[in-house]
Image (cartoon, rainbow, N blue to C red):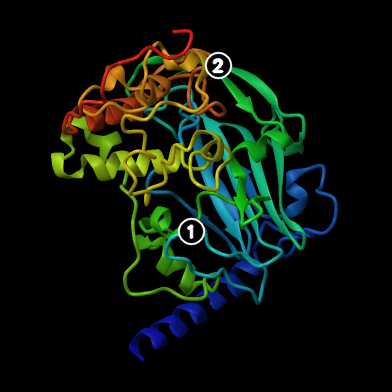
Amino acid sequence: MLRFTQILASLFAVGLLVSCESTSSPFEGPPTVDVEAAPPESLSELQLFLWDPGEGFVYNERVVPYELNTPLFSDYALKERAIYVPEGETMGYDGEGVFSFPVGSVIVKTFYFAPDMREPLVDRELIETRVLMHTSEGWEAWPYIWNEEQTDAVLSPSGATRALSFIDPQGEPREASYLVPQRNQCSSCHVRNIGEGGEAVLTPIGPAARHLNRDLDYGAGAENQLAHFLDVGILNALPAMTPAAFDFRRIEADGVDAIPAAEVDFAARSYLDANCAHCHSPEGTAGVTSQLFLNHDNEDDFRLGVCKRPGSAGGGTFGRTYDLVPGDPEDSILYLRVETEEVGAMMPQLGRSVEHTMGSALLYRWIAEMEPVDCGPMMPPPGG
């Protein structure tokens, strides 16, 4: 009863806040999302958020920002994520998969860079905003590219590439060929093969309980994101125990070597889940062809790559035979493909042009600290 009372009090407080804000809101009313209509040419027409170089991101009613425990790496891009759920609707909780979203929901993710990523809030430049809209026919993905004036973003289904120079969070100069994906390329990561027939269905990736179970400051101090979603009325339920993926901020702050040995497997599996499992899972496009499953709940070591020959690595084998050789990262194709910057061999295939040094260092340590296994005679791959 106490919890219910607290929720009512929070909802009342939020209602008052929304009511008070509405008198001085910079928006012309609530979000103007019509998921059954053609997407607007300008991002601002949705009235989901405003960008102010001084104030940062300003959100409209029922648009709630969120962050992920272990995020997808994208050439060191900083990301601002938010969920919009229509008035009177809620997301459905799922302890393992992505939450179920009502029709009319929108997920927005804005990618931006700073000249020196050690000071990410100084001279930020917004590059693109990706929009996922849940229509009555399923999810639709739309890319928007920000103009030079940083006043709005324009619908850009054909995508773009952008040469970027910046200092990465470790102080190293970087030159990236950043890709704004074409609309059709969105399916490379977001499509799942669902059901017995393997119907290709576009789905969100990040908003799952294990990725969202962490704190974020919504203006009144640190607060659990899932509890906040429940309090502001966009999530329908929350169990007492919710899984959490490894919090990658610990590695960004202290480095890979600071992780206790007992947590290395959990950290590496969380990283693979966030960065690879959207394709390499039983329902992912690359998982179907390669049978390499990197989802966090895969318990089959062979499907994890241990002593497994690759299904379709092509030149990405680097002359090695197995996806993963316990105790030997330099002989493991999985590590080499994550570490390389060679076009056509690097993994993931989309979304990065430079190495994520902390990610590859984590996977190196993970494989190196595995109990060595004799994978048998090291036969060269065909043509190798």
**Quadrant of the image for the C terminus?**
top left
Tell me where residue 3 appears, x and y as whole percent.
Answer: 36, 84
Give residue 255's quadrant in the image: top left
Tell me where residue 162 appears, x and y as whole percent.
Answer: 63, 20
**Quadrant of the image for the N terminus?**
bottom left
Element on which disc 1 rests: loop
Q: Of residues 251 and 350, which is closer to you in this image?
A: 350
- Can you name the residue that lies furthest to the right here? 37
Tell me where residue 77 appears, x and y as whole percent.
Answer: 50, 31
Of the two numbered discs 2 and 1 on the same chain, state the one appearing first in sequence: 1
Q: Which amino acid is tagged 1? A: Gly
Q: Is residue 37 left or right of residue 377?
A: right
Crowdedness of circle 2 by 10 Å Cα count: few (<14), some, many (20+)? some
Give residue 223's quadrant in the image: bottom left
Q: Circle 2 sits on which residue?
A: 344
Q: Circle 1 sits on which residue?
A: 97
Against 88, is 355 above or below?
Answer: above
Q: Which amino acid is tagged 2? A: Gly
Q: Residue at x 56, y 77 (%)?
A: 15
Q: Residue at x 55, y 77 (%)?
A: 16
Q: Which mark is residue 113?
A: none
Q: Of residues 137 and 131, which is closer to you in this image?
A: 137
- Can you name the residue that lies furthest to the top here? 384
Q: Residue at x 55, y 33 (%)?
A: 112
Tell me where residue 190 appears, x and y as whole percent.
Answer: 61, 44
Residue 124 in view of the camera: no
Q: Residue at x 27, y 36 (%)?
A: 251
Q: Is residue 365 left or right of residue 100?
A: left
